[in-house]
Amino acid sequence: MERKIGTVSRGVRCPIIREGDNLVDIAVTSVLEAAQSEGYEMRDRDVVALTESIVARAQGNYASVQAIADDVKAKLGGETIGVIFPILSRNRFAICLKGIAMGAKKVVLMLSYPSDEVGNALLTYDQLDNANINPYTDILTLEKYRELFGENKHEFTGVDYVQYYSDIITGAGAEVEIVFANQAKTILDYTDCVINCDIHTRARTKRILLENGAKVVCGMDDILNASVNGSGYNAKYGLLGSNKSTEDTIKLFPRECQDLVEDIQAQLLEKTGKHVEVMVYGDGAFKDPQGKIWELADPVVSPAFTSGLIGTPNELKLKYLADNDFKNLSGAELKEAISKSIKEKDANLVGNMASQGTTPRQLTDLIGSLCDLTSGSGDKGTPIIHIQGYFDNFTD
């Protein structure tokens, strides 16, 4: 009988992960038990994905706010520190800000506006237009911001992040000054020691600051990029990708985990005879049309993946073929013609009009986004995702 189902993404439950747990055994056992309980078979080119959270938990990759403070003070001198372009997040940044403030006497907090890097809005463009403010050139003090715009609470969280971040800094024992600007070099009018907190534009921001006379510039990736007094760390990403764990600790992005995905792949091959691709995923890469939030607050969607997930899709657009190449065909004749085109397609479809409208993104970004949407971020309890049929096409 002809197969009627294409891609299927399943959330797989597993035990609550603690430091030191054997994640290879847990992942393999959980996936195989799920398949048995639901009555389906493993297939070649299935994808098994683990959320970065359980990987970091198994590694015990945690750090205290005191460790952040100690690292910040050692690297930036402990006096007046500029903190620029942070995202507006209670989970992602607030606890990092607490540690940074503990390592300084004064924090000059420079917020981008009307929104942060991932789309969390302080203001709307309509508000800026009504106030005749140009976000590309105008620099606002806190007093001017309040005079023009008053209190602006986030649509979903109900938090006034300007006040919230100010309170965190003063609560940590530092003086605070808040500025609103979108040009990185603006901060150098206040201090020459800067932490740039942007994620995906961090290299450019560092370059601009150093070219314009900054004395010390650290990105979030430069803080806790090595252990401080036995703390967790991430040599490549530092604080990037971290999350709040408790009021005084953070969970860092997992450290090197390539061995993990390859060991899971090898064990699944041994137990099932199937070649399965494996990856670790964090935030998906998609945007919310209502809140305008771009989900990707991690430095990458996937910090580790097996070799079969390298590259981009190489697909033909079925509706293009149906509406153009085979517009005069229908029924079984149309199906046969499209199937033949798929089977005979070039190994690289770049520039081919029949591939227009397909998604030109990395496989790990696409699959990681699917995983993030499947697992959610709340209480589903499915930190492992099993995807089948992702690499199938119309002819399979």
Image (tube, rainbow, N blue to C red):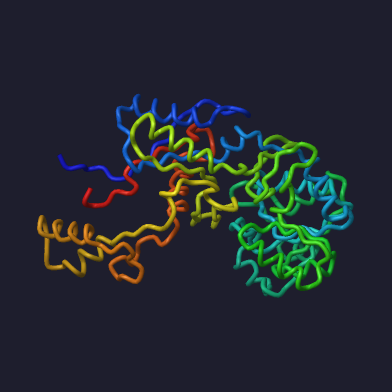
> What percent of the width, then of the height, locates residue 104?
86, 51
Looking at the rendered structure, the number of numbered marks drawn on it comes to: 0
In this rendering, the answer to whether 193 lies above or below 372 is: below
Q: Residue at x 44, y 59 (%)?
A: 361
Quarter occupied by the N terminus: top left
Residue 145 locus on image (x, y percent): 75, 64
Which image quarter: residue 204?
Answer: bottom right
Can you tell which quarter of the image residue 108 is in? bottom right
- What residue sits 65% from the left and 51% below the top? 236
Q: Is residue 112 left or right of residue 316?
A: right
Left or right side of 45 for 173:
right
Q: Looking at the image, is 379 positioned above or below residue 109?
A: above
User: Foreground: 323 or 344?
Assistant: 344
Residue 265, x across and y down, in percent: 43, 38
Tell me which residue sits at (60%, 53%) in the image: 299
Q: Is residue 129 above or below residue 30?
A: below
Left-right relation of 78 to 33: right
- Residue 256 x, y percent position in the rendering: 60, 44
Q: Of 187 and 69, which appears nearest the observer? A: 69
